[in-house]
Amino acid sequence: MTTLTDLSLTDAVAGLRSRAFSSRELTEAHLQVIAESRALNAFVLETPDTALAMATASDERLTRGEGGPLEGATLGVKDLFCTKGVRSTAGSRILGNFIPTYESTVTANLWRDGAVLLGKLNMDEFAMGSSNETSAFGPVINPWRSSASNRPLAPGGSSGGSAAAVAANLALAATATDTGGSIRQPASLTGTVGVKPTYGRCSRWGVVAFASSLDQAGPITRSVADAALMLKSMSGHDPKDSTSLPVETPDFPSFVGKSVKGLRIGVPREYRVEGMPAEIDALWTRGVEWLRDAGCEIVDVSLPHTKYALPAYYIIAPAEASSNLARYDGMRYGARVEGPTLSDVYQLTRSAGFGDEVKRRVLIGTYVLSAGYYDAYYLKALKVRRRIADDFTQAFEKVDALLTPTAPSAAFGLGENAADPIAMYLNDIFTVTVNLAGLPGISVPGGLDAQGLPLGLQLIGRALDEGTLFSLAGAVEKAAAFTARPERWW
Amino acid sequence: MAIDVDTVRKVANLAQIREPDARLEALAGELSGILKWIEQLDEVDTDGVEPMTSAVAVALPMREDLVTEGGDAAGILANAPKARNNFFVVPKVVE
């Protein structure tokens, strides 16, 4: 019998429904692998008691012939999602032992559909980072290793724990969030599938806020079909999030495997950046050929403001973060450092509670919003954001989707980019445009580089057109026939 | 634009973050580097461009002005570092 933890989410759900195995068996198998895999540091909190109780309840429903679309399926949850009665930290010291008294809408949707919580996953502090190294719980180690050396590699970030857990078969799938690339970049670096849906597709209610106009939840999985299944459950209008879109959720899994014949695929020339490894360029070319072979028409397109997306992002995201993170004052929840005056308590609490990268971004955000600089920085960035969004609108008059690399490199060593903030920021060069424009994007594994490390391809779609992305991603997945798995060294 | 230590101290104060002087020096360098990189935005012609304040072009929905939840002091105080008699306890602000 195949090891239960190796099953795809789609196959596991089918196996549970046919009673080939129970959710309790599946859950116990995952809990054991999680316990054996602590060297990866993917989980910041394991919840075995909750998991077994949820699995038992799922088995009872399945025995009665009931149960939702994810009944009994074992998931990990990024620690940015508030989970009722289960510590939620956002990867920060400042939240201390915060135990939410409410459940985020996205996770509530998953439990409604029968999923089982295995635990909370490690992440960059407040989702600010591209390597998981800013986490207060220490970095996640990528389960993938280079064939050339045994040095520990970063899984990407900020959803590093989600990506590593899924890549190492510690969970069938995981929730993640993406503000500038935090789902797609780690998916690319771990050989997994990651979806950043259209802004407003998933409710942000109960997700710890980083940059509210950019944050969006999505899944990380081991297949495109699994991603479609997860996103269908996670999505849906929520009156508690005023930016949640009042639209029906399409049956995403039905789009996987659909013909992509006749679709027009844009290849944006500005994504061919200086210094990009030849292997990534070659994979991109292969991706174009795969889609052409599947019957797509390939079109050269231009997104002229691409190079300005990251600098604009590093005004807008820190500005929003400096406002969102003002709530951490040690008064109502989270950690508090005592001091003689109120101001001392605020300052000591925030200085002890926030890590260096979070402080940097809060300071940049405060600076660009401060009197005298607002127009020069913040307003300018909002205008450039419009230019970037207009580039996409014009491109989508000619094409149905865009194909690009997901990240400018394969997994890099821990500590390699840590000294230079801008070098780290450049990880999001191909992903951040999508957040600024509010569009959906998906990363699919395309192949391995010469060191045996996975590389991803990104597809970008029109707003609310995740369905087409799932069809195209399914075609890329089929052509790539990516079956490599990280060899277990941990 | 390069920012100096005094500016960093002022901004840190606005953000209620207290850092030792040695760290302020380093931060001045780091933030100046980031701001210098950001300033390439000046190359973009944005004359007459409407600032983009929302990721999707939809009007925010209105709802009935009704109480939907409340009366849960215990839940609200559950994570308070200090609480007494259904209140948050904070340092004295008036002598």
Image (spheres, coloured by chain):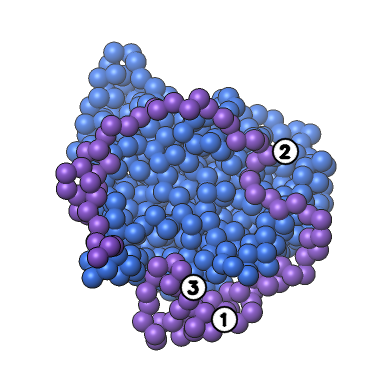
Q: Quadrant of the N terminus of chain A?
A: top left
Q: Residue furthest left?
A: B85
Q: Residue at the spot x=67%, y=64% of the render?
A: A375
For the residues beneath circles 1 and 3, the answer to whether they share a chain is yes
Mark 2: which amino acid? Ala
| Position of A218 relative to A312 (above/below) | above
Q: Are marks 1 and 3 in contact (CB under 8 Å)?
A: yes
Q: Which residue is mark 2?
A: A294
Residue A17: horizontal and vertical position, in percent? 36, 21
Q: Residue at the spot x=31%, y=19% of the render?
A: A62
Secondary structure under tag 3 reads: helix
Chain identifier of the residue bearing label 2 in the image: A
Give the letter of the blue chain.
A
Residue placed most toward the observer, A382 or A249: A382
| Position of A347 relative to A46 (above/below) | below
Q: CA distance from mark 3 to mark 2?
A: 55 Å
Tag shown at residue B3: 1
Residue placed most toward the observer, A86 or A57: A86
